[in-house]
Image (spheres, rainbow, N blue to C red):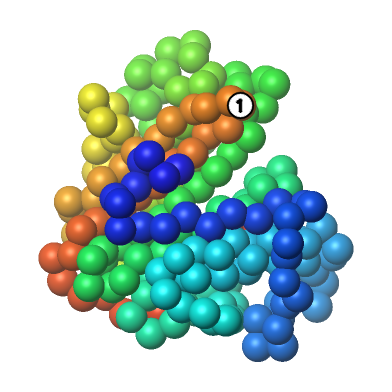
Amino acid sequence: MTALMPESVPIGMAFPGSTVRSLLPDETANLPLTAGVARRNDFQLGRAAASDALRQLGFEAATVPRATTGAPEWPEGVIGSISHADGLALAAVARAEQLSALGIDIERVPDDTDALLHSDVLTKFEHAWCGSNGERAIQIFSAKEAIFKAIYPSCRRVVGYEEVELAATPDGFLASAVSKDPVLSRSLEELTVKSSIFEGWVQSCAFKRLTQPIPAGSGYEDATV
């Protein structure tokens, strides 16, 4: 993930067997009462990864509460994103004066990548680009997940897969709005989208260098937490 990001964006990591701090009361305050053991474990790994990234940015002992919307609440002047899959959690953070949008996603490449080729994740244009290549389809899925996290603070709603279309470029993807939502269109402008597959993992990020400020402390996390 580090290779995809600007140098100013530290990446935190946590996984079972690593040193994972205990969750603090303000971090668990908005966790659903129905959250099971696996979900709480993912949440704890995500917060440990967030703490690791924040330490690299100069924030010691910072907590990352969960808003009622599910979004992480970052320290003032910080934006960030958390993703977890298959026991691995990553977090990326940046100072709000450096980036105005940031989202990341990780996915384990499944044994059967063809399932996404027949899903509603892809637009007709994206289907044509993927052809029969399931790995391309999971890259689009992951890239869209990163995009949704990056633009959530400006859109303030859950965006559907069919509302965003990706076109491959030499450096990643160009994102454009399919739906006639002016807020979504503006949110996608100047958004850098990158994705790679390495050793069975898909890693994707979406970020926007600062052109105008967004609400500090904003961000979004995997919908599973």
Relative vertical location of residue 91 with respect to residue 173 in this rendering, above or below: below
Residue furthest left in the image: 211
Pinpoint residue 52: horizontal percent, then vertical percent. Answer: 55, 65
Relative to 144, is 59 above or below?
Answer: below
Of the pair 120 and 59, the residue shown nearer to us: 59
- Tell me the quarter of the image containing the N terminus: top left
**Residue at the spot 58% in from the left edge and 25% down from the top edge:** 199
Residue at (18% x, 53% y) in the render: 189
Task: Report whether residue 114 is seen.
Answer: yes
Residue 157 in view here = no
Q: In the rendered view, tell whether residue 15 sits above or below residue 25.
A: above
What residue would you read off at disc 1? 200
Looking at the rendered structure, the kind of residue marked 1 is Gly
Q: Position of residue 214 (x, y in %)?
A: 27, 75
Q: At 30% from the left edge and 58% from the top edge, which residue is drawn? A: 8
Q: Quadrant of residue 215?
A: bottom left
Q: Position of residue 208 (x, y in %)?
A: 24, 56
Residue 223 as seen in the image, left or right of residue 167: right
Q: Is residue 86 above or below residue 71?
A: above
Who's the residue at 84% across and 65% down the image?
Answer: 36
Q: Is residue 175 left or right of residue 198?
A: left
Q: Nearer the viewer, residue 22 or 185?
A: 22
The number of discs equals 1
Q: Where residue 216 sits in the image (x, y, percent)?
A: 34, 80
Between 159 and 111, the one lying in front of the other is 111
Image quadrant occupied by the C terminus: bottom right
Mark 1, Cα crowd under 10 Å, few <14 / some 14-19 / many 20+, is few
Horizontal side of 71 relative to 124 (left or right) equals right
Mark 1: secondary structure: loop
